[in-house]
Image (cartoon, grey):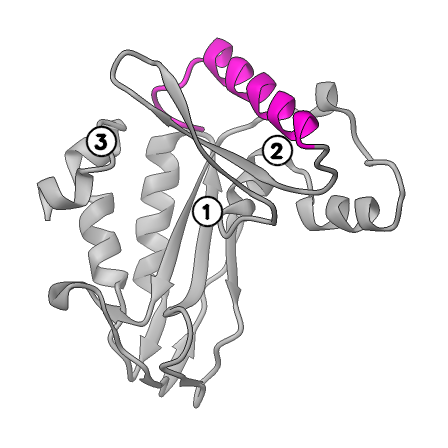
């Protein structure tokens, strides 16, 4: 969960998101995005009418398989859970691993992955389709893996992510793994003290 979001404010945002989806007659999985200002006012940005790249974070803290629920919707079946059954537990973080060079304005770095090791363990999830010998084409998004971790607190999740990234091997191409380390080691990030200008201000 967001480090600065209270339960009351989260519920208010959720109620607004549901109201917007109902007003549009939307019936599927989707995400309403808001921005929060320093005074805790929130503003609508957009609605994504699809599963988000970040959906594993929600799945880890809620224990709900969002893809399964989306298939139920498509099949005309009821959801397997009710809203009151959803209880958030612990903290989850996702790092998008991209074949890109953060030192060169995040320039994409297509090429062939020589060696891959995807770590695992309790509370660790890797979503990827890469393998040793996989060729990253220059035509698509540069994301090649998602590393998601879950633990009891934000601090423990950050520690687990650092450990997991330390075991990740993607040799042969330039990636943003070291840059993710820098973010995880940043004191403001660890405290949840950041804005949309975080990268520009710190890196």
Query: Residue 27: x and y, percent?
Result: 74, 38
Q: Residue at x 27, y 78 (%)?
A: 109
Numbered range of the magenta stretch: 1-24
Q: Residue at x 67, y 25 (%)?
A: 23
On the rendered image, what quadrant is the N terminus found in? top left
Q: Can you tell which of label 1 and label 2 is closer to the viewer? A: 2
Q: Residue at x 56, y 19 (%)?
A: 16
Q: Which mark is residue 62?
A: 2
Task: Tell me if residue 55 is in the magenta stretch.
Answer: no
Q: Which mark is residue 149?
A: 1
For label 2, the SS is helix
Q: Residues within 10 Å of mark 1 (few under 14, many from 20)?
A: many
Between the C-alphas of marks 2 and 3, the distance is 24 Å
Between the C-alphas of marks 3 and 1, the distance is 20 Å
For the residues bearing labels 1 and 2, Cβ distance under 8 angstroms: no
Query: Residue 96: x and y, percent?
Result: 38, 57
Q: Which mark is residue 194?
A: 3
Task: Tell me if residue 8 is in the magenta stretch.
Answer: yes
Between the C-alphas of marks 1 and 2, the distance is 13 Å
Taking depth in this image into account, of 27 and 123 the one nearest to the observer is 27
Query: Splitting the image into 4 quarters, where does residue 189 fall?
Result: top left
Q: Can you tell which of label 3 and label 1 is closer to the viewer? A: 3
- In the displayed structure, would residue 162 be above or below residue 30? below
* Label located before the other in sequence (1 or 2): 2
Query: Residue 180: x and y, percent?
Result: 26, 54
* Label located before the other in sequence (2 or 3): 2
- Would residue 41 be found to the left or right of residue 54 on screen? left
């Amino acid at each position: 969960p967001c480090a600065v979001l209270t339960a009351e404010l989260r519920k208010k945002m959720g109620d607004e998101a549901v109201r917007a989806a109902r007003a549009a007659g939307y019936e599927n999985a989707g995400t309403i995005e808001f921005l929060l200002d320093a005074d805790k006012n929130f503003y609508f940005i957009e609605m994504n009418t699809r599963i988000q790249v970040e959906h594993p974070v929600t799945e880890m803290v809620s224990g709900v398989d969002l893809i399964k629920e989306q298939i139920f919707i498509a099949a005309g079946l009821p959801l397997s859970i009710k809203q009151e059954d959803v209880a958030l537990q612990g903290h989850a973080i996702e790092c998008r691993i991209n074949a890109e060079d953060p030192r060169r304005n995040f320039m994409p770095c297509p090429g062939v992955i020589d060696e891959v090791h995807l770590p695992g363990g309790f509370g660790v999830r890797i979503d990827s389709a890469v393998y040793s010998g996989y060729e990253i084409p220059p035509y698509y998004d540069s994301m090649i893996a998602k590393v998601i971790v879950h633990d009891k607190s934000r601090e423990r999740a950050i520690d687990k992510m650092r450990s997991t990234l330390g075991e990740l091997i993607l040799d042969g191409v330039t990636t943003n793994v070291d840059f993710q380390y820098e973010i995880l080691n940043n004191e403001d990030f660890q405290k949840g003290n950041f804005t949309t200008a975080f990268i520009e201000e710190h890196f």
